[in-house]
Amino acid sequence: MAVSRAVRRAIAAALALAALAITPASEAHPVGSTSVNRYLGVSCSAVGRVQIGYLLDFAELPAYAEIEQLDSDHDGSVTPQEQRAYLERRLPPLVARWTLEVDGSRAAPRVVGSSLEVLPGEGGLSTLRIAADVDAELEAKVVPPAGPAASREIRVHVVDDVFADRSGWRQMAAEASPGVDVVSSTAGAAGDVLGYTDAAGEAPPRVDDAVFTFRARSAGGAPREASSSRQWLAAGALALASALGAAYALSRWRPRA
């Protein structure tokens, strides 16, 4: 008797769970095989344009469900077209759930670039990492306050509680960009972000609501900042994506044959 695709997938999932159960804990994902981990790196231009580096790291079990969606025809391989379709379908609803305010005015986040990696995990499963560049546009036109741009402070409030019901490492940080300094952050220091550090057995950070204050250094650098900031964000996203795997052994970075 033929076995349906749904039954085969259910059997595969059961076998995968069993494999994880007998995998030594010391070799598992650093924040647990059921975790969904998130990082938001928030930067701001001298004219109040907000850019966010968004990173999601799905550990083995949640990645299994995501990869089922990613491989839309379930043929065991993922094409570039399937990757792009998945990202365009998956990411906008996630960022649309954020609350984002710039100097008290609502801003609408918009995904402007994204990529993903499927990496080997434990028990024959994979992990999934998604990196995205997000711009935020004010929903209503706001007239900047009078005075020299060099003295202007910009307050950015971000709330992201997507996947807050899942275990995992959740952090936000303010990131300086050309011409703009970070004045303050309620998210704490950004020193070890993305390193999955577990100093003295501390629980992973759970930051879902943060306020960041930025200050522009000079008015003259603002026109050039738009292009240089985009280059900075792209380079930063690559560095952050690499840092997400810092807790893994180097051998786990080899792609599957």
Image (spheres, rainbow, N blue to C red):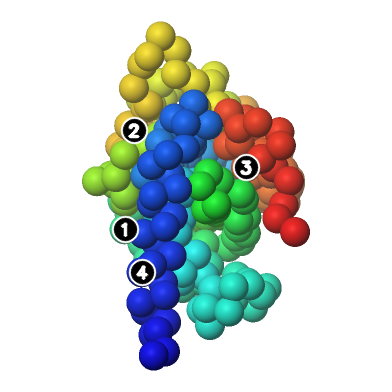
Q: Earlier in the sequence, mark 4 or mark 2?
A: 4
Q: Secondary structure at mark 3?
A: helix
Name the residue that disc number 2 marks. Answer: 207
Residue at horizontal 38%, vertical 42%?
Answer: 21
* Residue 173 circle label: none
* Residue 241 circle label: 3
Q: Earlier in the sequence, mark 1 or mark 4?
A: 4
* Residue 97 circle label: 1
| Along the viewing direction, whichever of 199 and 153 lies nearer the viewer | 199
Q: Is 85 rendered above or below residue 186? A: below
Relative placement, left or right, of 34 versus 192 is left
Relative placement, left or right, of 72 versus 255 is left
Which of pointers 1 and 3 indicates the residue nearer the eye?
3
* Residue 10 circle label: 4
Query: Looking at the picture, which amino acid does disc 2 mark?
Result: Val
**Inter-mark Cα distance, 1 to 3:** 23 Å
Residue at horizontal 44%, vertical 30%?
Answer: 25
The quadrant in which the C terminus is found is bottom right
Which of pointers 1 and 4 indicates the residue nearer the eye?
4
Q: Could you tell me if the residues under marks 1 and 4 are in contact, i.e. CB atoms within 8 Å?
A: no
Query: Looking at the picture, which amino acid does disc 3 mark?
Result: Ala
Query: Looking at the picture, which amino acid does disc 1 mark?
Result: Arg
Q: Secondary structure at mark 4?
A: helix
Label 3 CA crowd tier, 10 Å (few <14, some 14–19, many 20+)? many
Which of pointers 2 and 3 indicates the residue nearer the eye?
3
- Please state the horizontal and vertical placement of residue 96, each as a whole percent of the image: 36, 62
